[in-house]
């Protein structure tokens, strides 16, 4: 298995953004020392109550300057918010600054809230995201200047000043549970994965199909399939639960839409859960309706909280059931004190990772 530090860079009570970023660098430096494989961040916009990360390139470069070996990148760039040439240039420069340590996630964007301030249509986000993969390969091709004419992206006779270290480009990721997108990923050698709001039992058949499609494409190595959720490790189960379970049940308040006049917390939860019903994802809707219930989180192993032994056992079971070989752990959530945060990361790196490193879920 492989292991990632994942962060929304959530706002933290009593901290300025600068203080929050400095804490983030301390987290990533420790992860680098402990041989984590990856460090990933989100790209979110215009929600100061939620995430303080709107520029994943700056995250990657800032983290790269403070680490030696961990691979870094966005999970992922919200592709429709960028001009494709500008994004291709930026990815190449980040990979150069990192000395070839970049991992590149691409996403269409999860919420209309990120698109409205830019004056862009949320409903047209998927096609330009998929097409950008072909655009990148043209931009980084041997033929320079390059031209590209697709359904969404058009460039005539442009030359990339800086090419990426990794050829033809950094490893690509596209977190998705959509069968058509997963087929595209398999055909184009793109790693994938999913977040805790999608039930592992529903995810497993889709990712087994993805693995079959990947093998049919003839790629020489296995893909990475990731699963992301909260994790907290402490010296005993009781201590871990006392410190982290209630905090975990409040970690995802930023998922909810901003409160309308007269809204209760329950109203916001119900409104958000209903969006998954509209997508035909009843299982995810049930999860979202209960994601603020600590007993539900614990009973269904939607977050991994406990001693090193307990967390390793839970992860082993979840990876087998949910068909993933890369765990993206979000260690810093709610108002978790830094001493507890850093102890959790250290225990995970020193005692959980060695237990699972040789395990191959598929």
Image (cartoon, rainbow, N blue to C red):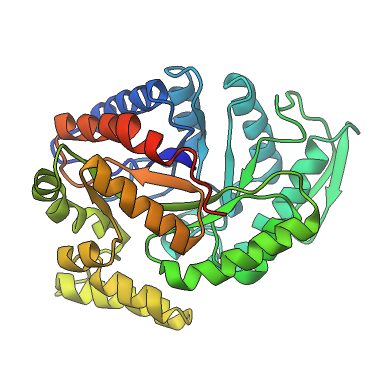
Report whether 233 appears left or right of 356. left
Would residue 302 appear left or right of 206 to someone viewing this image? left
Quadrant of residue 94 in the image? top right
Question: Which of the pair 34/142 is nearer the observer?
Answer: 34
Closer to the camera, 234 or 282?
234
Left or right: where 73 falls relative to 48: right
**Quadrant, the C terminus:** bottom right
Q: Is residue 39 visible?
A: yes
| Picture quadrant of residue 126 | bottom right
Please, is residue 67 above or below residue 135 in the view?
above
Position in image of residue 242 (x %, y %): 8, 49
Q: Residue at x 48, y 82 (%)?
A: 280
User: Where is residue 122 shown, x and y percent of the image?
Assistant: 53, 65
Placement of 296 over or under 33, stated as above or below: below
Of all residues, the one furthest to the right in this rendering is 143
In the rendered image, is residue 229 in sight? no
> Along the line of sight, which residue is nearer the eye, 336 or 270?
336
Task: Name the quadrant containing residue 169.
Answer: top right
Q: Residue at x 24, y 59 (%)?
A: 253
Name the foreground residue: 328 vs 257: 328
- Does residue 101 appear to the left or right of 318 in the view shown? right
Q: Residue at x 28, y 55 (%)?
A: 303
Residue 250 image point, x, y percent: 19, 57
């Amino acid at each position: 298995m492989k292991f990632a530090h994942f962060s929304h860079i959530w706002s933290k009570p009593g901290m300025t953004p600068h203080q929050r970023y400095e804490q983030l660098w301390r987290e990533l430096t420790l992860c680098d020392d402990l041989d984590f494989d990856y460090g990933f961040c989100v790209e979110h916009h215009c929600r100061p109550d939620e995430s303080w990360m709107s520029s994943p390139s700056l995250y990657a470069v800032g983290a790269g300057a403070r680490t030696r070996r961990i691979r870094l990148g966005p999970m992922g760039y919200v592709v429709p918010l960028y001009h494709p040439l500008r994004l291709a240039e930026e990815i190449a420069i980040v990979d150069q600054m990192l000395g070839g340590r970049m991992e590149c996630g691409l996403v269409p964007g999860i919420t209309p809230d990120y698109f409205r301030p830019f004056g862009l249509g949320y409903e047209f986000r998927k096609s330009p995201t998929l097409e950008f993969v072909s655009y990148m390969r043209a931009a980084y091709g041997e033929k320079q200047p390059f031209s590209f004419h697709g359904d969404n992206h058009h460039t005539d006779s442009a030359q990339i000043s800086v090419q990426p270290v990794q050829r033809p480009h950094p490893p690509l990721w596209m977190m998705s549970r959509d069968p058509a997108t997963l087929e595209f990923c398999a055909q184009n050698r793109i790693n994938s994965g999913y977040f805790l709001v999608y039930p592992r039992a529903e995810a497993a058949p889709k990712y087994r199909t993805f693995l079959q499609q990947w093998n049919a494409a003839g790629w020489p190595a296995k893909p990475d399939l990731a699963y992301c959720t909260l994790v907290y490790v402490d010296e005993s189960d009781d201590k871990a639960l006392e410190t982290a379970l209630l905090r975990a049940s409040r970690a995802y308040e930023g998922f909810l839409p901003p409160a309308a006049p007269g809204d209760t917390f329950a109203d916001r939860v119900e409104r958000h859960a209903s969006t998954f019903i509209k997508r035909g994802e009843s299982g995810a809707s049930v999860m979202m309706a209960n994601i603020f219930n600590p007993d539900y989180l614990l009973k269904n192993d939607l977050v991994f909280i406990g001693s090193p032994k307990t967390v390793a056992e839970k992860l082993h079971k979840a990876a087998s059931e949910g068909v993933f070989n890369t765990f993206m752990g979000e260690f810093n959530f709610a108002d978790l004190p830094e001493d507890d945060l850093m102890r959790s990361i250290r225990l995970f790196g020193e005692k959980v990772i060695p237990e699972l490193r040789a395990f191959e879920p598929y």
